[in-house]
Image (cartoon, rainbow, N blue to C red):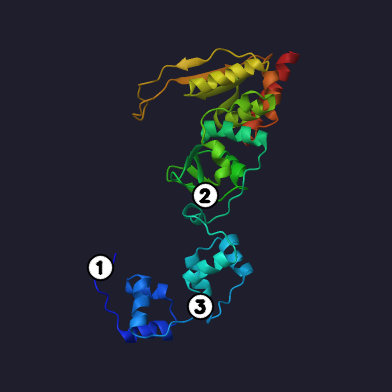
Amino acid sequence: MMSKQIEISMELLSDLYKNQKLSTFQIAEKLGCCQATIWKKLKKFNVEARLPGVKRVNISKQKLKELYISKKFSTWKIEKITKIPRGTIHRKLREFGIKIRDRATSHIIYFRKDFSGDLLEKAYLIGFRLGDLGVRKIYPNSKTISVASGSTIKNQIDLIKSLFENYGKVWIQKTKDNKINIQINLNESFNFLLDKEVPCWVKDSRKCFFAFLAGFTDAEGSIKIYNKMASYSLGNYNYKLLDLIKNNLMKYGVNCNSLVVDKRKGKKNSEGYIYRNNYCSLRINSKIELPKLFPELKKYMKHKDKVKDLNIAISNINQRIKT
């Protein structure tokens, strides 16, 4: 707030306004005062004000939409490109009926695309997110959903990239300890990834449930051969989630063993980290039950390494059944 007298000479003001053709907004910003002060000084010094529209603004609606909507340039950048005062840019936006971005939207630089809406893709992403993705809004009123993860396994990072690269800008960075970090910024159509609960529509649909389980398996699952026998296992600290998966598998005809709980809560690991929960695991080894499960997972799994492991396990079961 300006409470002190601003000393502006008639010569300086006349030069800025008449010779340099600066707007009152630009002069006010240059001299560190408000626009009203400039108008008062112009009147006091009898400097004739330029009439609106005397200087023709040479920018079309199409050009302004290209810069502001398509390229998402700020009004500051448009001012630098076109040499048209920012205040005039705002006026032309209103005249052309171009909606002015709010603060959150104005911070979006890179392209964003709405989620496809496909329920099976959505179910898979929810499963994968619960297994291996950190998801957050970058600040409370943000319109950006940030998805991030880290791994030393390149195929895991490649999979995450393939899941989201059509929807937003992907950043990948390698760390000194051979870890690869990945982050993707998405629009609000991916709000469903913020929730850590499994939606009812996933549990109540056979197809959606197995798409969800395929996503969770790609993130957290293991399909291996132990003692010449195929085995499928899931491990996680979320007992409630694994119990939900077990109950749904039973509902859809795949019998499971009971959950195994490793009581780690409160203990320290080798790095001094204190476990906040017990570690739970769900395992299926039966050559009767696995043939019910694997064909369902194979429809939706995407992780190259785990799809390869799945095919090896299927071959193992087929051989065991023959012998």
Label disc, if present, on residue 171 of the rendered structure: 2
> In terms of secondary structure, where does tag 3 sit?
loop
Which residue is identified by label 3? 52
* Nearer the observer, 192 or 170: 192
Residue at horizontal 35%, vertical 77%?
40
Tell me if label 3 and label 2 are in contact, CB under 8 Å: no
Q: Amino acid at mark 1?
A: Ser
Residue at horizontal 48%, vertical 44%?
181
Quadrant the N terminus occupies: bottom left
Which residue is identified by label 1? 3
> Where residue 253 appears, x then y in whole percent?
68, 15
User: Which callout, 3 or 2, points to the residue nearer the camera?
Assistant: 3
> Where residue 321 appears, x then y in whole percent?
73, 14
Label disc, if present, on residue 245 of the rendered structure: none
User: Which callout, 2 or 1, points to the residue nearer the camera?
Assistant: 1
* Nearer the observer, 227 or 13: 13
> Where residue 150 appears, x then y in whole percent?
49, 40
* Nearer the observer, 256 or 252: 252
Nearer-N-terminus badge (1/3): 1
Q: Amino acid at mark 2?
A: Trp
